[in-house]
Image: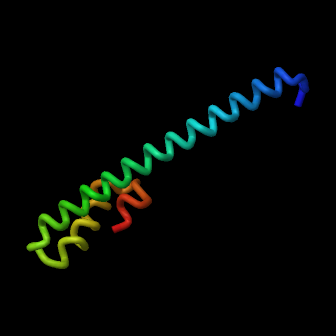
Amino acid sequence: MLITSNEYLQAVQEINDYVNQAKYRASVSVNSEVLKTNLFIGSVIIRNSEWGNKFVDNLSKDMRMKIPVQKGILFEI
């Protein structure tokens, strides 16, 4: 730390707090969108349940071909 005055330390803390709050808000927003997406995918699966058990397997394979670079919660079916 180059400057140790109280005003400087307060400014550093203020910026740090804001960045941490922004990270929190971003993670809440991302989690909300992931939840909405998973609910949508689930509703499509339920709506088309008459296609049988292989529907989810085929859907998973087809989605991996359509979006091959995506990893994570949304496409780990």
Instruction: Indicate whether 33 appears above or below 73.
Output: above
Examine the image and state in which quarter residue 2 appears. top right
Instruction: Indicate whether 26 appears above or below 10.
Output: below
> Residue at the spot x=38%, y=52% of the render?
34
Snapshot colouring = rainbow
Q: Is residue 47 left or right of residue 15?
A: left
Q: Is residue 38 left or right of residue 59?
A: right
Q: Give x and y (percent) for residue 41.
A: 25, 59
* Residue 12 or residue 59, whichever sits in front: 12
Specify the farthest residue to the bottom: 53
Q: Is residue 13 left or right of residue 24?
A: right
> Residue at the spot x=44%, y=46% of the render?
30
User: Looking at the figure, which quarter contains the N terminus?
Assistant: top right
Examine the image and state in which quarter residue 22 appears. top right
Q: Give x and y (percent) for residue 36.
A: 31, 52
Instruction: Indicate whether 68 appears above or below 10.
Output: below
Q: Give x and y (percent) for residue 27.
A: 50, 46
> Residue at the spot x=32%, y=54% of the render?
67
User: Looking at the figure, which quarter contains the C terminus?
Assistant: bottom left
* Residue 17 or residue 61, whichever sits in front: 17
Q: Give x and y (percent) for residue 42.
A: 24, 63
> Residue at the spot x=25%, y=73% of the render?
57
Number of marks in the rendered image = 0
Examine the image and state in which quarter residue 72 appears. bottom left
